[in-house]
Amino acid sequence: MSSTVSAQPGGLHTSEVAAEAGGHAQSAMPTALLGMLLFIASEVMFFGGLFATYFNARATSPGEWGPPAGAHELDIVLAGVLTAVLVASSFTMQFGVWAIRRGNIRGLRIWTALTLVLGVAFLAGQLYDYSVLGFGLADGVFGTTFYTLTGFHGAHVFGGVVGLTIVLARAMRGQFSARNHVAVEAVSIYWHFVDVVWIAVFSTIYLLK
Amino acid sequence: MATTTLDPRAGTYRRSWVLDWLTTVDHKKIGILYILNSFIFFFAAGILALVIRSELAVPGLQFVDVATYNQAFTMHGTIMIFLFIVPVLAGFGNYIVPLMIGAPDMAFPRINALSFWLLPLGGGLIFSGYLFGGAAAEGWTGYAPLTAERYAPGVGTDLWIIGLTLVGTASILGAVNFIATIFKMRAPGMTLFRMPIFVWTILVTATLLLLATPVLTAGLIALFIDRNYGGSFFDPAVGGNPVLWQHIFWFFGHPEVYIVILPAMGVVSEIIPVFSRKPLFGYKAFVFATIGIGLLSFSVWAHHMFTTGQVLLPFFAFMTTLIAIPTGVKMFNWLATMWRGKITLATPMLFALGFVSMFLIGGISGVMLGQPPIDFHLQDTYFVVAHLHYVFFGGSVFGVFAAAYYWFPKMTGRKLNEPLGKVHFWMHFIGFNLAFFPMHQLGLSGMPRRIADYSPDAGWTIFNLVSTVGAFMIAASIVPFLINVVATLINGEPAGDDPWEANTLEWATSSPPPAHNFDRLPPIHSERPLFFLTHGHGHGPAAGRERDLVEEPEDDAERRGGAA
């Protein structure tokens, strides 16, 4: 009982203190990354709620499940291509992360730019798909659940595109290094999450019979 | 040797205290903002409760019309739950949790400020329905199809949806922040199983918020699409399903019940040991009971939907009854802590004991309602209203006031007046039981909830009158509390660092703490670091209060003094 432990120095900014605390007792994951993972956990539950509405509507809806009479069938080929685009973008994102972990900022720039292009391509493809489907949000419960699920996924892709743009802009200014790139890691986790959600959306809406 | 002494104020500039509070990212100031904001909403929703009780005092419509009455009970429930109980407990968590784990702040201070500021915004939007042709009027549960556009055409329901979405976002961000703080910011030596129980309850609460709130957000968005863009999620005429709303709402709503009660249980578990002069009996059992309640809370939502005929009654009745076990464990924790303790009946302890006794009644009526044969009779009667008020008010709100009296000295450096506190407690306690106990009988004799009027021949008049008297007594009990707070702030008894001789780290720093919380931390070898600092480990004479020897740097005293 003779000594007191020194508290964290008051002058330090909280994130620095957190980074230091990460050094001992606690695990090595940066606080910002843990925050992103927790946020994604809440996003999983959000999409869980939307999927629940979809399955409930599909299970209780009378008649055949699908686009209303007179509208086009869903374009599974286009959706398949878009799936490939988004899955590919997950790989390019990860190549970028691996590049900056080795300190290769040029690699990060190239791979992030490529990911960004693929993400925008996905959004453009989805908007094109919406424009030719011939039914809308208000055309029965299929239209409502279809546009809500794909629309909220699209909104999340858009959020990811914004994040990627910020990462790219910061990479162009040379703000990342092998030691300091937690924003890249966080955005990449989010991007992978958005990709996984799309695979679930695609499987549910297009593949599940 | 030429040395330069830096003026401690060098590099700072004067700004108004208003701007300082509006832009602060200090968890202590944000915590106080949370608490103040919550009490404003508490008073607003309390006035609505008086409107309801006044109308019901005697048969007939005396004060308001039916539409106004519907808005009153909807806003009362929504505001009390989403903008008072949850945020006020989050506010105490914001202030106390970093102090309890020896951290300088929350993990994400700016996100912390954002999650606070979404609350007045969201709450303001919900209330603003009154300015645009009437607030939402479908009950706080917003059941479909009452919320469909053709039954609720006003914009009030849309504002209710948007406001709740913002409040939910605040909860999610706050939950991320609490969990990250508790996992990443603990002081050396503060292992998980040395954390104060309050921190544990906040951790489990934050996890429930993180996983339950987004489901409500999804439901609210679906409802918004139905109302505004011709969607058909909940409209059976076009293939939707109104019961789906109940599933979504209660999948969120039941964990929400534990979100509301767990931090209050944490408060009580801090207070009872301190005022019994004993360690909490069964620390680990309490922790596992808390985690158990958290896990079970996701498997009981359909007990709110027994009478829909669309849920598996035995399963949900069984899971609901199971929750009584960890809750019962906690009751024994508290009772065994007090057993042969040296009990002091100071105001925080009185409110804590009020919590234990009133929550017990609410828990028992909860187990009753969890049995389908009873529930089929009591669904949507005043018995349910009695039950939920014994849990929310007899439980959580007593916990809130216990926390207020217990931590007020830490936040302000001054101790609330004890006699006034006791007057507050007894008026509160008697008023509460007058207001809500008769509702059990009203429910058993068939009075439905959410009605503005009833027949004089129904035999409900006397109980309603007693209930109304109780409601006004509760309102009156707030007066000594407010007088107490104001008088104490002006000229209260200085509290010192540790007025209650407590166990946990928040009492190891000054009252109020400096901006960075701690100059020195005591060694942490148990869940009661401060107790061992004061009293030693029982070997030989106590070491004395070590931290009294630690001098505080002058610039801190100045910083606290004001300006800066």
Image: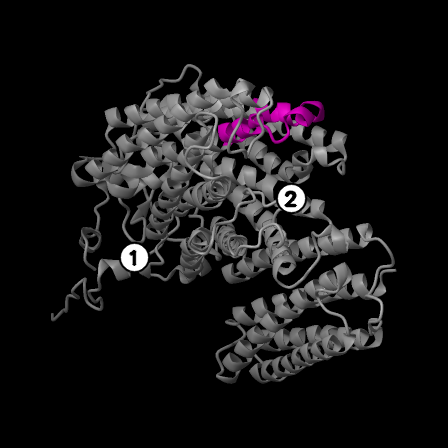
**In the rendered image, the vertical position of residue B436 relative to residue B413, given as above or below:** above
Residue A135 within the magenta-colored segment of the rendering: no
Q: In this view, does A140 lie to the left or right of B128?
A: right
Task: Tell me the kind of residue under disc 1.
Answer: Trp
Q: Which of marks 1 and 2 is in front?
A: 2
**In the rendered image, the vertical position of residue A23 relative to residue A125, given as above or below:** above
The picture places residue B556, in percent across and down from the top left corner, at 22, 53
Which residue is labeled 2 in the image?
B251
Give the quadrant of residue B301.
Answer: top right
**Magenta region, residue range:** B364-391
| C-alpha gap between disc 1 and disc 2 | 37 Å
> Sequence-wise, which precedes: disc 1 or disc 2?
1
The picture places residue B396, in percent across and down from the top left corner, at 46, 34
Read off the chain for label 2.
B
Q: Can the viewer see residue B541 in this picture?
A: no
| Residue occupying the point 36% across, 24% down | B350
The picture places residue A71, in percent across and down from the top left corner, at 82, 72
